[in-house]
């Protein structure tokens, strides 16, 4: 059972990236919007509070760019024992390109322990977007396009959301679906799985096996030289002990990875013809693609 009761922050969010019309959002770079963040609270499983970080396209003062809203939505599921805050760089980047990013917390920092937090978060933000005076008023539509995205163990949750709630797209970052996921329900829906060649936690044979369980159209993108925790900020010594060393600068691998993710989101959530053609072509710098 899920109960949705969003709190109602008003006024601007906290600016995390200043807007810049000089940025075009191409080639894995940030887009022209500012990115700002606000916290929304909701309730799940009757008695548990869920904290949701929402990052949205903004102006320089932290106000939603309502002149360009509503925006498509990306719901992000963090990896196991990793907080959503460690993926803020991804949320900021995606928001500057004109998407609202919804990132809930999870019980014990394990998305698998409270998987329904993800959909509860989406419902709460949709409700907030319909609330007069809310910071997010008008940010997204209740029937707007939405993709699920998750890193590592969060990929399991993202796949469940996509399969069970008919999200428009799914991005698995260094992860794979759980056995028994009802993937056949979404046959024909475009899927992106992306990982690094140096990933020592989600091993490439396992990621590939999971990828092959999806029907076409699908893409497996392997970023040369990227490891598992290059996708997160604040990697700890314990994290790195379970990983392989990166062989390229993090700034380069992140940009190569986001170039693919950006193209996918533009194609699936915006219906952009050029992005769709680029996915079909599958030629991305620093990335090896498998269908």
Image (tube, rainbow, N blue to C red):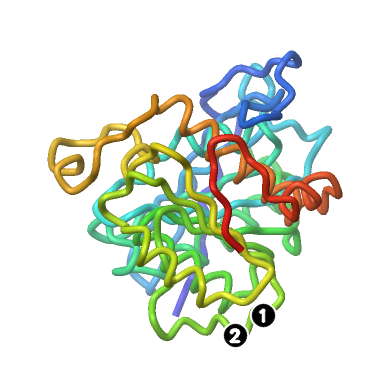
Q: Nearer the viewer, residue 82 or 62?
A: 82
Residue 138 in the image: x percent, y percent?
A: 75, 45
Can you say whether 233 is above or below 266 in the image? Answer: above
> Circle 1 sits on which residue?
187
Quarter of the image where the C terminus is located:
bottom right
Q: Nearer the viewer, residue 216 or 131?
A: 216
Task: Name the disc covering residue 184, or none.
Answer: 2
Task: Name the disc covering residue 198, or none.
Answer: none
Q: CA distance from mark 2 to mark 1?
A: 5 Å
Q: Residue at x 61, y 24 (%)?
A: 62
Q: Quadrant of residue 85?
A: top left
> Which secondary structure lies at badge 2?
helix
Residue 86 in the image: x percent, y percent?
A: 35, 38
- The answer to whether residue 148 of the structure is visible from this angle is yes
Is there a contact, CB below 8 Å, between mark 2 and mark 1?
yes
Q: Residue at x 45, y 53 (%)?
A: 173
Residue 125 in the image: x percent, y percent?
A: 59, 54
> Which secondary structure lies at badge 1?
loop
Q: Quadrant of residue 285?
A: top right
Q: Which residue, as the protein is rendered here, is positioned at the far right?
A: 273
Q: Residue at x 29, y 69 (%)?
A: 113
Q: Quadrant of residue 177?
A: bottom left
Left or right: 273 as drawn, with respect to 123: right
């Amino acid at each position: 059972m899920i109960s949705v009761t969003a709190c109602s922050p008003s006024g601007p969010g906290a600016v995390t990236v200043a807007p810049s019309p000089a940025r075009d959002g191409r080639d894995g770079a940030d887009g022209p919007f500012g990115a700002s963040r606000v916290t929304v609270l909701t309730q799940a499983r009757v008695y548990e509070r869920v904290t949701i970080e929402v990052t949205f396209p903004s102006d320089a003062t932290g106000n939603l760019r309502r002149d360009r809203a509503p925006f498509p939505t990306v719901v992000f599921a963090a990896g196991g024992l990793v907080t959503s805050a460690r993926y803020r760089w991804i949320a900021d980047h995606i928001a500057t390109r004109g998407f609202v990013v919804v990132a809930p917390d999870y019980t014990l920092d394990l998305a698998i322990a409270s998987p329904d937090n993800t959909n509860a978060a989406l419902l709460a933000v949709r409700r907030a977007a319909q609330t007069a005076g809310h910071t997010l008023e008008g940010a997204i539509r209740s029937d707007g396009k939405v993709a699920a995205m998750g890193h590592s163990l969060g990929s399991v949750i993202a796949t469940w959301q996509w399969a069970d709630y008919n999200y428009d797209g799914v991005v698995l970052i260094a992860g794979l679906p759980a056995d028994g996921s009802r993937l056949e329900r979404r046959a024909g829906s475009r899927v992106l799985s992306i990982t690094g060649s140096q990933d020592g936690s989600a091993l490439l044979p396992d990621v590939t096996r999971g990828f092959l369980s999806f029907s076409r159209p699908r893409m497996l993108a392997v970023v040369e030289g990227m490891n598992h925790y290059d996708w997160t900020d604040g990697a700890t010594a314990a994290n790195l002990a379970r990983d392989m060393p990166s062989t390229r600068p993090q700034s380069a691998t992140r940009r190569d990875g986001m170039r693919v993710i950006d193209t996918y989101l533009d194609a699936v959530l915006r219906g952009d013809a050029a992005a769709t053609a680029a996915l079909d072509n599958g030629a991305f710098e620093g990335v090896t693609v498998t269908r």
